[in-house]
């Protein structure tokens, strides 16, 4: 079971923040998104199935930069997030791609069109594994995708 957390860029300073994702419950232009931490404490009353949950350090974020954690780390132990740019050494040489959510799972959309042919078609989606190395994100270094 993987940890369901997110990261996004803060509205106030543009820096990345990791944690739990919430919205303010509004629709349209009033809708805002926040990422932060939770403190969960066991309820001290008579019911044993109730918990007190407190949100701390929540910051408003740019919803266009929301990335979900894949539950995996790269070959250097760095967390792999949706929209990360990763590289991988394959039998064809080095390759670069973007982490995406596709057909119910996280995978890499590789830049090179010749990799992983299936039934005469090129299938550029490929599983994430320990050979991958995170190089950046599409939000901070989009030019890295041009190198592939």
Image (tube, rainbow, N blue to C red):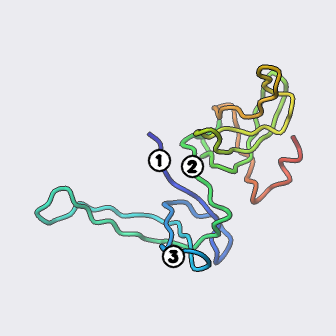
CA distance for labels 1 and 3: 26 Å
- 58 left or right, relative to 113: left
Q: Which residue is mark 1?
A: 3
The reply to whether dot 1 and dot 2 touch (C-beta < 8 Å) is: yes
CA distance for labels 2 and 3: 25 Å
Residue 89 image position (x, y, % from top left): 78, 29
- 116 left or right, relative to 58: right
Query: SS for tag 1?
Result: loop
Q: Which residue is mark 2?
A: 69
Residue 101 image position (x, y, % from top left): 64, 44
Q: Earlier in the sequence, mark 1 or mark 2?
A: 1
Q: Residues within 10 Å of mark 1 (few under 14, many from 20)?
A: few
Nearer the observer: mark 1 or 3; the answer is 3
Q: Quadrant of residue 67?
A: bottom right
The reply to whether dot 2 and dot 3 touch (C-beta < 8 Å) is: no
As drawn, the residue found furthest toward the left would be: 46
Residue 81 image position (x, y, % from top left): 63, 49
Q: Which residue is mark 3?
A: 26
Q: Residues within 10 Å of mark 2 (few under 14, many from 20)?
A: many
Of the pair 10 and 34, the residue shown nearer to us? 34
Q: Earlier in the sequence, mark 1 or mark 3?
A: 1
């Amino acid at each position: 079971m993987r940890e369901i957390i997110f990261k996004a860029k803060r509205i106030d300073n543009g820096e990345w923040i990791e944690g739990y994702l919430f919205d303010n419950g509004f629709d349209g232009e009033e809708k805002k998104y926040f990422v932060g931490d939770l403190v969960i404490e066991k309820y001290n009353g008579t019911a044993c199935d109730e918990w007190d949950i407190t949100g701390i350090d929540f910051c408003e974020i740019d919803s266009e930069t929301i990335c979900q954690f894949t539950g995996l780390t790269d070959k250097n132990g760095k967390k792999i997030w949706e929209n990360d740019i990763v590289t991988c050494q394959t039998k064809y040489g080095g390759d670069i791609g973007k982490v995406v959510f596709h057909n119910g799972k996280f995978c890499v959309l590789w830049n090179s069109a010749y990799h992983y042919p299936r039934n005469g078609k090129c299938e550029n989606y490929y599983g994430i594994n320990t050979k991958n190395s995170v190089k950046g994100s599409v939000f901070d270094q989009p030019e890295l995708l041009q190198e592939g």
